[in-house]
Image (cartoon, rainbow, N blue to C red):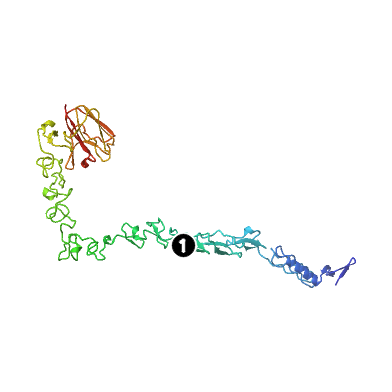
Amino acid sequence: MTRVMNGTRKPWGVRSLGGSRVWLLPAWLLIALLAGATACGDDDDGGAGGTGEPGGRGGSGGRPGGRDGGPGGSIAPGADGGHAGHDAGPRECVRQTDCPLPKSECAAPMCRAGRCGEAPLAAGKRVLAQTKGDCLEAVCDGKGAVMMRADDNDVAEDELQCTLDACTDGAPTHTPSSARSSCSQGTGKRCDGTGLCVECTLNSDCTTNVCQDGSCQPPPCGNGTRDNDESDVDCGGACTGCGPDKICADADDCKGLLCSTGLTCVPNCADEVMNNDEVDVDCGPGCGGCGSGDSCTLDVHCAGGFCHPTQHSCATPTCGDHFQNQDETGEDCGGSCPPCATGCTLDSDCTGGICYGGNCFDSINDCTPGTALSMSGAVSITFPNANSTYTPNCIKVPPGTTVTFSGGDFADHPLAGGFVVGGTAMPASSGPFTPATTSGTSASFTLQTPGSYPFYCNAHGTSGMSGALFVVAP
């Protein structure tokens, strides 16, 4: 029924019911109103229920989905009130920060219609959690998850000096360096071509000249093992001969070439061991004479025939060892040594015109007064010249003459008083050239007393660098 009010048709009417006026709405308008109330229930409270017509039911409150349902409709005379709207429950959030962080780095929290959710981040975004050296990069896939993609700049280091580390299409590669490249890892010195730094790759890399599996090894005859054709540990066969009591197969396995019937090497004078009656290794009684420096107790133990009585070692006899030995007829004189003579104090006491150290000599340092160069005034002797000599080396001068040695360095050619005989230097105990001159390049000596004054170079005297000064009164 449509009412006309003030000349206008209205879609509702008014009816009296029990003394009250009731608004009557057409069904299509009521449905439209209810639909609007329901649509607005998402974020706000539900609307109130409508008023029922007489004999009808009031409208229901707003639909669930808002914060609270609306109250039921009012009761018209002869009608029931509408039902109250349903309670939608409390909100989860008002803003994004009210929501928990997602587990994935590739999603962000969001708040929509009071409810928390997750929003995916842009595809290709690099995440924080990365694995160093795996040739990969962790990025977002645009759907909220993490995905891996190749990163050839994220090189994996294997910490080996003999490999070239790289990434190829997201996979690590470790290419071995060329063989014999230099390295210094551990005890290694050379790359072996397989990626390892080893001690050697060639036998010549080892002092033992044996390289096995990248390591220097003892030589076959020094590895502490009986192997190959050895008759005992590291001896016999292709190795050196074995010593006394070592196992042998034949004489060739032994030092001294003596293998017993019991197949052990027999002690002998060539086994490099001091045994039997030897006084030193392989010398002495039963063997040959011992050499200089070897132990001894008797002269017969020594090849040179002289066992030093206090040092108990073989020594080479000389004309200055203060012992009578070799062919000497007295201590350090006679035979191949200077003649033994006593009682001379002057050169004139001797037939050869030379008295030195109380003994007469026919010549001294290959000089005689008769062949010496007579000089006077300032006398100069040069050394070492071009052949380690003194020039002149044999001089005869009057008393009071000053003789100067120059031209060389006394550090290299020390000047000493004394003479050389039989290849042995005999230093003077006194005289103008004692003690030896060992520094500087020039030295002068004034000779006042008549006599014979031999001299020589400490370093080269036994090679002929010697001479003599004869001071002869007019």
Q: As rendered, which of 21 and 278 lies closer to the eye?
A: 278
Q: Looking at numbered disc 1 in the image, what kind of residue is underneath it?
A: His
Q: Quadrant of residue 332?
A: top left
Q: Quadrant of residue 356?
A: top left
Extreme right residue here? 7
Residue 114 lies, in percent from the top left, at 66, 62
| Location of mark 1 (residue) | 174
Residue 78 lies, in percent from the top left, at 79, 71
371 to 1, vertically: above or below: above
Residue 205 lies, in percent from the top left, at 35, 58
126 to 327, vertically: above or below: below
- Residue 361 placement, left or right of 200: left
Q: In the picture, which quadrant includes the C terminus?
A: top left
Q: In the picture, which quadrant includes the N terminus?
A: bottom right
- The crowding category of the residue bearing disc 1, from other C-alpha atoms within 10 Å (few below 14, some 14 to 19, many at least 20), is some
- Residue 140 placement, left or right of 465: right
